[in-house]
Amino acid sequence: MTNLKDFFEIDTNDVPVKKPINRNAYTLEDLKYKLKWIKAGQELGGEVTMDEMCNFCITLPGKVRTDKSVICLSHTDSVDNGGQFDGPLGVYAAFKTAQDIVKSGKQNAINYKMVICACEESTRFEGIACLGSKFLRGDNLDFDAIISREGTSLRECIAYFKAELLKAIEKERFKTN
């Protein structure tokens, strides 16, 4: 069973390690961390999907009303030198709820969805935050005009992330949808 120590750096006294986290959106650090969640979601029996923005959704299907869903949403990316619990703790709480649903042995009546938003508070795109949730909301984002501090467009950052994701999926033999 997955627990908090699997996703956060905790020392031997169950105290969080106090070092800054640099997990900017669409970087290898962000990818490695998201892959841990994807694998854990698949081990629970969840169906994992990804949209154009690289928001991930892990779904435990409902039995009665598959057209209805309960959605828990958070993010895993960080600001520069951020804390390890901001965002990921919300993902962890959603994951623990999914674990409890599965552990109960009862199938939920409606879908349960755990959404991991991309690029929610990344300092990589200076002054622009919540891109993943804005995309989910239906905002019209200009993928070519949003530029990272490295001078790379959002479209290019996403393309790089997806290419690295495909390599990781092939290497790790993840299930894909």
Image: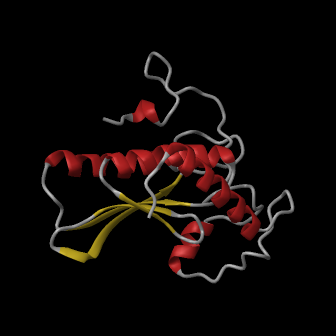
Image height of 9 relative to 103, above or below? above
Q: State left or right for residue 92 relative to residue 120.
A: left
Residue 17 appears in which quarter of the rendering?
top right
Residue 143 appears in which quarter of the rendering?
bottom right
Residue lying furthest right:
151
Image height of 50 relative to 144, above or below? above
- The residue under the point 67% across, 58% down is 163
Q: State left or right for residue 82 relative to residue 39.
A: right
Q: Position of residue 60 (x, y in %)?
A: 29, 60
Which quadrant would the N terminus be assigned to in this image?
top left
Image height of 139 relative to 34, above or below? below
Q: Position of residue 8 (x, y in %)?
A: 50, 34
Q: Position of residue 53 (x, y in %)?
A: 60, 69
Which quadrant would the C terminus be assigned to in this image?
bottom left
Image height of 107 relative to 171, above or below? below
- The residue under the point 32% across, 45% down is 96
Which scheme is used to colour this image of the protein? secondary structure
- The residue under the point 53% across, 29% down is 9
Q: Position of residue 76 (x, y in %)?
A: 55, 50
Q: State left or right for residue 72 relative to residue 143.
A: left
- The residue under the point 50% across, 20% down is 11
Please count the marks in the image.
0
Residue lying furthest top:
12
Q: Nearer the viewer, residue 24 or 172?
A: 172
Q: Nearer the viewer, residue 47 or 129?
A: 47
